[in-house]
Structures are given as C-alpha cells and as structure tokens.
Image (cartoon, helix red, strand yellow):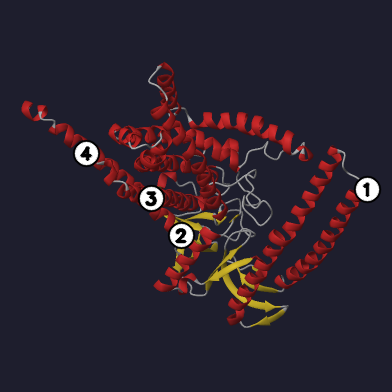
Amino acid sequence: MKTWFKSGSPWVWLSAAGVSISLISVVGLLFLIASRGLSYFWPSQIHQFELRDVQGQTSVVIGEIYETERIPASQLNNKNVDIGDAETVERYLVKTGNRELVSLDFRWVLEPMVQKRSQPDDVVVIERRTNGNFYGFIEQVYMDGKPVERAQLEDFIDRVSDLQEDIEQLQSVDIGAINYELERIRLNERKAELDGTLTASVKSNFEQRRTELANQYNELEASLNKLRQDVQRDKIVVRAMDGQVIDINLEQVLQITFNNQLGLFGKLGQFLHQIGNFIGNDPREANTEGGVFPAIFGTVLMVLLMTVIVSPLGVVAAIYLHEYAGNNAFTKLLRIAVINLAGVPSIVYGVFGLGFFVYMVGGSLDQIFYPESLPSPTFGSPGVLWSAITLAILTLPVVIVSTEEGLARIPSSMRHGSLALGATKAETLWRIILPIASPAIMTGIILAIARAAGEVAPLMLVGVVKMAPTLPLDGNFPFLHLERKFMHLGFHIYDVGFQSPNVEAARPLVYATALLLVTIIVALNMTAVSIRNRLREKYRALEH
C-alpha cells in the first residue's frame, strides 16, 4: 500500500475521478437545460377537464398541463373537494390562458374534482400579440363583417401577417428614418446657433428640409392608416371554457393551431417553427413571450466589439512585457498587477466603467463634440461601446497571460537566427514570433469570449436594458450606433427568471434562453478553436 501511494497512482485516479465528476455534472446540467428548454417549443396536447365540487357545482377548464405532482392531503385546504381517506392527492398545473376572462394564466386542478377528462379535436390554441394564448372553440369567422367558411381562416391569417410586416416596415424603417432625420436637423440647427453661424439663409434651408420631410411623413402616415384599417377587417368568434363567446380581431392573432389534431410530423414542424420564431422575433408581454432576437444581436455584437478591443491591447501589452521590458522591479510589479486584475469582482469593473467611461469620458465627448444635444447625453450614458470596453478591461489579464506564455515557449534560437540573418527586431516579431505565438493568442481570446459572453453584473451598469427600443445597427447613418443601449441574453435570463410578473409562464422561457446562450458561447468558442487549430498546424513546423 505504501509503495502504491509513493508511486503516485492514487493521485492519478483521484484526478481522473474529479475530471469524470466534472464532465458528468456539465453533461447533466446541459441535459437539464436542453430538456426543459426544448420542451417549451413542443406543441402540447390540450385537455378539457369537467370538474365538480362537493356542492355539486360544475365547471370546465381547458388548457395545457404544465406540471403534475402529488401532495399530502394535510396540505389541502380546499373544502370543496371530497378526498375521502386518501393520504395524497394528485393535482395538475394547467395553463388556461384567456387573460381577458381570468386573472391568472395558470390554475391547479385537483384529481378528485375531475369528473371527465378529454382531448377534443376541435379545441384551438390562438397565439396572440397581447393577452397571451387563448384556448377555446371557433364558432364563426368573419371577413369585413360577413361570415365566411372556416377553411379560409389560414389565408386570412397570412394576409394579416403580411399587412403587419408592411406596418412594421413603415413604422420602424420609413417613418423611423424621417424622425431620425428631423432630429438631426434639430441638432444641426442647434449647433449652428451655438457656433453663431445660424443665418437667415441657413435657417431657411432647415425649414425647407423640414417641410419636405413633413410632406413625406404625411404620405406615409396616410398609407399607415390605410394598412391599419385593412388589418382590422377580419375577426373570429370563439367560445371559451366557461361558455362565454368573445370576438378576437385577427390583427392580434399570430397563429392558430389545433394541437390535438397534429401527428408526429405535424408537431415536429410546429416545433421547428416555434424555435424559428423564438430566435427571430422580438419579445412580448414583459419578455415572457415572443422571441429574443434583440438579445441575441446585442450579445454577439458586444462580444465581437470586446474581442476587437481586447485582442490588440492584450497582445501589445504581452509583447512589451516579454520582449522589451527588462526583468526589473517595475516589470515584476506590472505582472503582479495583471494577475491581480484577473481576481477583481466583475461588478467592480462595472462601477469603474460607469464612473470613468460613461460619466468622465462620455461626458467629456458630449461637451466637446455634441454640445447641441445637451443636456440629453449622447455618449455620456450607458451604451454598447462602454459595455464592450469595460468587458475588454475585465478580460485583458486573460489575453496578456496567455499571450506571454505563448511567447515564452518560443526558443531564443529562433530570435537570434532571425536577427543574425539581418532582420530587425520588429520584423522578427511580425514575421516569426507572432505567427508562432498565434495559437496561444487565440487561446487567450477564446477564454476572454467565454467569460465576457456570460457576464451580466457589469453590463447592468454600463449599457444593458430590459427592452431596447431599437437595435444598435440600423439603416440610419452612421448605421452602427455604439452609443445606444442594448439587450443581452444573460440579463434577459435574469429579468425573466426573477423580475417576471408571470413566474410559471416564464420558467420554461428561462431554460430556453439559457440553452440559447450556451449554444452561442459554444459556437463562438468553436469558431475561435477552429482558427487556433489551423494556425497551430500552419506554424507547427517552425517550432522545431
């Protein structure tokens, strides 16, 4: 036994066990997130419960079963249920939707109250832009006030979707461009006034341009009103679970599905369609419904900006420390400072970014370059640029240490050989050292991306918001607006999971968004790893 311990085998097995436990934990966590997240998109069966209490009163509940559990009878305080001598009671958490008729999306249904349970083929799920899903039965379809056949309903929904896209195009692109141009005219006029160059002719030019834009706006507004009238033309009459009949305008309808009529391939098609909507659409209903496209866009843009900023800074700093700085007390102090920066809590970087970049640097830029916008800040408020710079500083130690390690592995003979052949030190660095060290540089970038993409705390102070009105990238000059606030998948998970007014509805969305965030981080890392491996193979021969 003593010989076995001296051989080091126990530590090898202990290390292997630790790695195995870590891998199993990671795989288990990913499986949990994937199973809970992907189940959010699978079309569920719609159940109809006919309930009866001890007084003989009956009611009907229609909806999706989200959860089933058994509870001790002692915890049951409902006196309208006769459970007999049973020690436990089974209950179902049912999503009933129909927010205009009931106060909550979910309700518990106790098994002893269920007299009959069925899955009607004609029950419909209506996904709406507001008020969540509606569960019920279609009574009649109306086109411009006249009843028509139900078979035309799908064509009407496609028509409404096309009209909604045209309305969105007019509002966000065409009318948005006019409003943006009007604001620029106001700022230019204010700037000319501050500079003392606002003459009568300049002011006349501004007024003429305003008149032209106002005429264009009136034309677009007339077209917009016409589209709104067209989109409100059709409606459906539906019967809810309590027998109440209501009208739903197709303007509010996103899609209508008969889940109980779907086969395997029909459910698979609906499953993929829902995933596509989740990735490509904007959020709705306080982020508890709809998609997460703005959050995906903001996350990827911020990470790419951070990578562009941190890569040259980290590489240059590492080159200075290893190739140019002498081995003195100052260099040792710099290395200690870099290592210690890696252990600073991320929220401290957020406070630093808010105080230095946003208020000091951004405020100074506003005073120098954008005085016409004051007191409304341009760069003196949180935005995607300050978020990227803050995270670049946060991940800078990782890139510096990784790059310096790569530089240290290059034999000195390669440097001496290059210099002996007549190359300058700069040429040696550019043509020999950096290409060979490029895999180590990419390793640092990979680690920086992995950390930055998942950070939330500093972003809450320097740029991220619950709902951004516009994307940082649009069709208005200068096209990329780095001063704008943005949405982030990590903050979206926090907001939906802990700030949502509808916890039960938000729970599966949290898992789905977490799965998407992990997928994006893995995709970014795999791209960087692929580049690193190609560089490693390309310059492997130079290392020997």
State which quarter of the image contains the N terminus: top left
Residue at label 4? Answer: 17
- The picture places residue 78, in percent across and down from the top left corner, at 50, 49
Give the residue at x 63% y 48%: 468
The spot of residue 190 in percent (x, y) is 83, 42
Amino acid marked by disc 3: Ile
Residue 457 in view in this figure:
no
The 10 Å Cα crowd at callout 4, few under 14, some 14 to 19, many 20 or more, is: few
Residue at the far right in the pictured view? 200
C-beta proximity under 8 Å, tags 1 and 3: no
- View extreme (top): residue: 329
Residue pointed to by mark 1: 200
Disc on the earlier residue, 1 or 3: 1
Q: Which residue is mark 3?
A: 531
Gap between marks 2 and 4, in whole Å?
Answer: 40 Å
| Mark 4 vs mark 3: in front | 3
Q: Is residue 271 left or right of residue 11?
A: right
How packed mark 3 is, by other alpha carbons closer than 10 Å (few <14, some 14-19, many 20 or more), is some
Instruction: Return the residue nearer the eye: 119 or 476.
Output: 476
Distance between the alpha carbons at the discs numbered 2 and 3: 46 Å
In the rendered structure, which amino acid carries the disc numbered 2? Ile
Residue 391 visible in image = yes
Kind of residue at disc 4: Ala
Q: Which residue is mark 2?
A: 65
Badge 1 marks a residue whose secondary structure is helix
